[in-house]
Amino acid sequence: MDRQPTLEGEALLLRPLREDDWNALYALASDPLVWELHPANDRWQEAVFRAYFADALAQGGALAVIDKASGHIIGSSRMQAFDPADGGAVEIGWTFLARSHWGGETNREMKRLMLAHALKSVARVDFRVGEDNLRSRRAMEKIGGRLADRDGGVVQTASGPARHVVYEITRETFAGGPLLAG
């Protein structure tokens, strides 16, 4: 499975994240409100974001999200944890968007592009979300994510341990789900 494709939609271009994206991406990520509900709510700090950015480049699967109208980077997302067993699964996550693109069609289009690509190769896409991150949980439900029975585990953050839950979208639920209706 190609975890770093170039994907193009009506309003967005997703392309592999590059080292020279640092300045544009950190300009967005340095807004503390972007991370307010996220388990790693200190990610707006430069040193913390540098580690996050370096990990994104090292792991592969990271995508820059570009607004086609302006040509500017407006966020990032990743495809990681590819597992070919049982029809295959991949995790989509580590997503953040500039606040100027919250609440509209941006997240919906980005996830539709990523899911359509991933579900050509795998039967299931997982999304690990901080249990208390209500903004992300609502966004998952809006795009048709189903809360799975699998435990998302606990991750140690600067604020302490954070429990995660797992949402999933399968080929079947994607084919009949809200992301394709509009």
Image (spheres, rainbow, N blue to C red):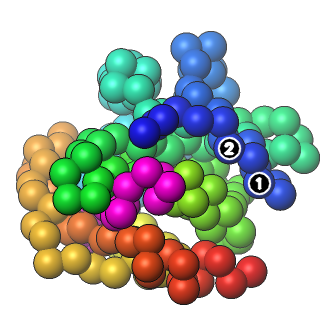
Vertically, is 93 above or below 66?
Answer: below
| The residue stretch that appears in magenta | 118-132
Q: Secondary structure at mark 1?
A: loop
Seen from this angle, which residue lies furthest top? 20
Quarter occupied by the C terminus: bottom right
Q: Is residue 127 within the magenta segment? A: yes
Residue 164 image point, x, y percent: 19, 62
> Is 113 left, or right, of 129 in this rendering?
right
Location of residue 72 by image quarter: top right
Q: For the residue carrying disc 2, how many other residues have a C-alpha within 10 Å: few (<14), some (14-19), or many (20+)?
A: some
Residue 73 image point, x, y percent: 70, 36
Please name the amino acid that badge 1 sits on: Gly
Please name the amino acid that badge 2 sits on: Leu
Instruction: Tell me whether the residue at label 2 lies in contact with that at label 1, contact meaning CB atoms closer than 8 angstroms.
Output: yes
> Is 53 left, or right, of 159 in this rendering?
right
Location of residue 112 by image quarter: bottom right
Residue sitting at 55 percent across and 41 percent down?
76
In the picture of the structure, the residue carrying the numbered disc 2 is 7
In the picture of the structure, the residue carrying the numbered disc 1 is 9
Vertically, is 22 above or below 138?
Answer: above
Quarter occupied by the N terminus: top left
Residue sitting at 62 percent across and 21 percent down?
21
Q: Nearer the viewer, residue 119 or 48?
A: 119
Q: Secondary structure at mark 2?
A: strand
Q: Is residue 57 within the magenta segment? A: no
